[in-house]
Image (spheres, grey):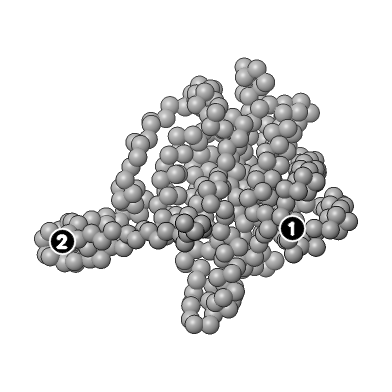
């Protein structure tokens, strides 16, 4: 409970759930993350690459989320780093970061990886920066084929080593699994590659859209009653036209739960020049090359200061008199429920 020190107005302030699948709690985490990352964005060309898993893999993905999402990350990493390193393409060590999304517009399962890739990299000896040709990073068709080949090769190894749980899945049968592999090898996988960012400000805008995002935002939910949930979605087949979708309440909950990632799973990852191991030295090289002088961000800004900077909202100002400051007068500790015991004494 907070009370105004001028007019005495009281206001209830609820505890944050801090869950990374909550749209409200993720807003502040997103803004804090973006503020920190502004130090690492440089004034060069950026590309947007998206790797999408075929829907034929959905049954395996749902039973093996952590394993399959890790495989998606590692396959995209290998495909991008290996192709960029070849002399017939870029011939350079590149860096990028990837963000996992698992949903489509109607909350259907749609695992895909968004990658932000600078348009160039360092030579193998790190003596010079090699810029890619204008509007061209690497050819998309060979990238598709390499990503598909790496992913399916590793998937077969996981299957062979019994590292996939396939209970109740028809692919538990080896013959059916091999048919799936053959089908996927002949399928044209979806990989999107486009120059999307001409400067650092557009990169930041992109980060704001995609980082810490969840399956559905509050603003998309139009109505909720005892039976149905109504929400907006974009119909990509009709030029991103917004339409209303009505879903049964229990179906909505089930669909939302498809996108809850495993505990401690890392959804934003950095590779190559941007990997945590290499980041400090590589950032310094980039600053020297581009002659960029960046004023260090003030570390560990409080969430209320970040909210004020981003939205202009001062949560400590009294909404009643608009003059006094709200001060904490009563505190109720949050309740943390422990899980039921798994072993008997």
- Residue occupied by mark 1: 166
Extreme residue in the left direction: 6
Q: Is residue 132 left or right of residue 308?
A: right
- Depicted 8 relative to depicted 150: above or below: below
For the residue pair 325 and 160, the one nearer the viewer reads as 160
Residue 79, quarter of the rendered image: top right
For the residue pair 41 and 231, the one nearer the viewer reads as 231
Q: Where does residue 149 sit, x and y in percent of width and height?
A: 80, 43
User: Going 55% across and 70% down the picture, which residue do you hit?
Assistant: 253
Q: Is residue 187 left or right of residue 1?
A: right
- Depicted 85 relative to depicted 2: above or below: above
Residue 25 can be seen, yes or no: no
Q: Where does residue 316 sit, x and y in percent of width and height?
A: 23, 56
Dot 1, how many residues are within 10 Å of its Cα: few (below 14), some (14-19), or many (20+)? some
Between the residue at mark 2 and the residue at mark 1, the CA separation in whole angstroms equals: 58 Å
Q: Where does residue 190 sit, x and y in percent of width and height?
A: 74, 52
- Residue occupied by mark 2: 4
For the residue pair 297 and 161, the one nearer the viewer reads as 161
Residue 207 can be seen, yes or no: yes
User: Going 56% across and 58% down the picture, which residue do you hit?
Assistant: 260
């Amino acid at each position: 409970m907070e009370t105004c020190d001028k007019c005495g107005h009281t206001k209830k302030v609820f505890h944050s759930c801090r869950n990374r699948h909550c749209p409200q709690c993720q807003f502040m985490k997103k803004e804090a993350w973006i503020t920190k990352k502004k130090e690492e964005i440089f004034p060069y060309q950026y590309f947007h690459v998206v790797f999408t898993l075929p829907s034929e893999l959905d049954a395996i993905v749902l039973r093996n989320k952590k394993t399959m999402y890790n495989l998606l990350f590692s396959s995209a990493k290998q495909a991008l780093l290996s192709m960029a390193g070849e002399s017939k393409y870029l011939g350079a060590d590149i860096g990028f970061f990837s963000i996992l999304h698992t949903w489509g517009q109607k909350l259907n399962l749609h695992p895909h990886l968004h990658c932000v890739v600078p348009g160039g990299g360092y030579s193998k000896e790190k003596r010079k920066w090699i810029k890619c040709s204008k509007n061209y990073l690497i050819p998309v068709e060979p990238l598709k084929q390499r990503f598909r080949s790496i992913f399916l090769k590793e998937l077969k190894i996981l299957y062979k080593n019994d590292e996939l749980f396939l209970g109740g899945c028809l692919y538990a049968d080896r013959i059916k699994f091999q048919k799936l592999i053959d089908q996927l090898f002949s399928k044209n996988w979806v990989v999107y590659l486009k120059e999307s960012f001409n400067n650092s400000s557009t990169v930041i805008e992109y980060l704001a859209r995609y980082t810490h995002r969840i399956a559905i935002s509050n603003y998309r939910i139009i109505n909720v009653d005892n039976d149905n949930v109504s929400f907006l979605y974009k119909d990509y087949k009709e030029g991103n036209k917004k339409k209303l979708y009505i879903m049964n309440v229990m179906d909505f909950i089930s669909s939302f739960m498809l996108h809850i990632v495993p505990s401690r799973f890392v959804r934003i990852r950095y590779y190559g020049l941007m990997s945590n191991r290499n980041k400090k030295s590589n950032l310094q090289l980039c600053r020297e090359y581009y002659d960029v002088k960046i004023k260090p961000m003030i570390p560990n800004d409080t969430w209320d200061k970040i909210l004020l900077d981003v939205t202009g909202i001062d949560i400590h100002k009294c909404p009643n008199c608009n003059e006094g400051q709200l001060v904490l007068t009563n505190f109720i500790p949050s309740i943390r429920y422990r899980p039921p015991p798994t072993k008997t004494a």
